[in-house]
Image (cartoon, rainbow, N blue to C red):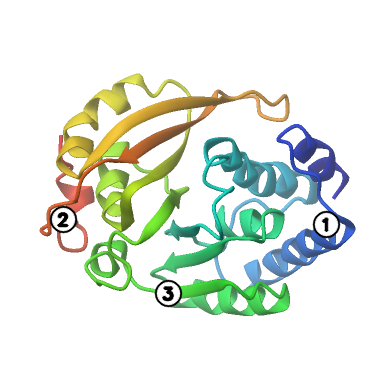
Amino acid sequence: MDILKTAALKLGIKLSPHQLEQFEIYNREMVDWNTRMNLTSVTGYDEVQITHFLDSLTVVLGLQEHLIDNKPRIIDVGTGAGLPGIPLCIATPDIQLILLEATSKKVTFLRYIADKLGLNDVEIVTGRAESIAQDEKYRETFDIVLSRAVAPLAVVAELTLPFCRIGGCFIAQKKDDIRKERADAAKAVEILGGKFGEIVDIKLEEFTDNRCLVIIDKIGETPQKYPRRPGVPAKRPLF
């Protein structure tokens, strides 16, 4: 994990030998399980370190102030193979992490790998964001909401902001020019109780595209009717 070890230092993260071994195990198990189920299209050893692990760790640039709190409560919506949640948990173990995933096969992998890595403060929830966000156990209870989902901000905002407590934030990982996408999402963010915060540019030579973190602060309650029923946010975004 030399590539990850060196690049993580640029983010202010010094990975211990134990943490590097956890990443090694995570990589090995993810690639192995990928032969039996569709977890990822990226399986090359060096590529995984950058495309999956380092990219996941860039979210620390958007949540520095929250990590000084006592065990911030974080949810990774649509986590898939555990990205960005599991890399973040390995690198910053003093967090409470919820991994939300709708596909049962991927949930089986998540439970296996969380146990294999000894991640004790990780809860794995099966279900769609549209449904789980209506559960009072999870609704507006998180300090930080993460999602690596490839979907327009207007869609992702409806699936994530209902989880976020007032005073917390949603961090979206984006690339390339996001000005139009941000403008299209303005109405949705306002309706859902959010407000656009800063945009943090990811300036690492390991990435050749223009990556950034779009931070949306939660300033008001999300109306109870949101998110709408499963599938509707993607079909009819709140433009």
Give the x, y percent position of residue 167: 34, 45
Q: Is residue 200 above or below residue 24?
A: above
Separation of residues labelled 2 and 1 (CA atoms): 40 Å
Give the x, y percent position of residue 5: 83, 44
Q: Earlier in the sequence, mark 3 or mark 2?
A: 3
- Which amino acid, mark 3? Val
Query: Residue sitting at 74 percent across and 37 percent down?
Result: 12
- Which numbered tag is attached to residue 226? 2
Q: Is residue 156 above or below residue 228?
A: above
Give the x, y percent position of residue 59: 56, 42
| Camera sees residue 152 | no
Please give left or right for residue 40 compared with residue 125 in the image: right
- Which numbered tag is attached to residue 20? 1
- Which numbered tag is attached to residue 125? 3
Query: In the rendered image, which quarter is residue 54 located in?
Result: top right
Q: Secondary structure at mark 2?
A: loop
Front position in the image: 31 or 18: 18
Q: Earlier in the sequence, mark 2 or mark 1?
A: 1
Q: Earlier in the sequence, mark 1 or mark 3?
A: 1
10 Å neighbourhood of mark 1: few (<14), some, or many (≥20)? some
Q: Secondary structure at mark 1?
A: helix
Query: Residue sitting at 26 percent across and 39 percent down?
Result: 194
- Which amino acid, mark 2? Tyr
- Which amino acid, mark 1? Leu
Front position in the image: 166 or 47: 166
Give the x, y percent position of residue 224: 12, 59
10 Å neighbourhood of mark 2: few (<14), some, or many (≥20)? some
Front position in the image: 45 or 70: 70
Query: In the rendered image, which quarter is residue 238 located in?
Result: top left
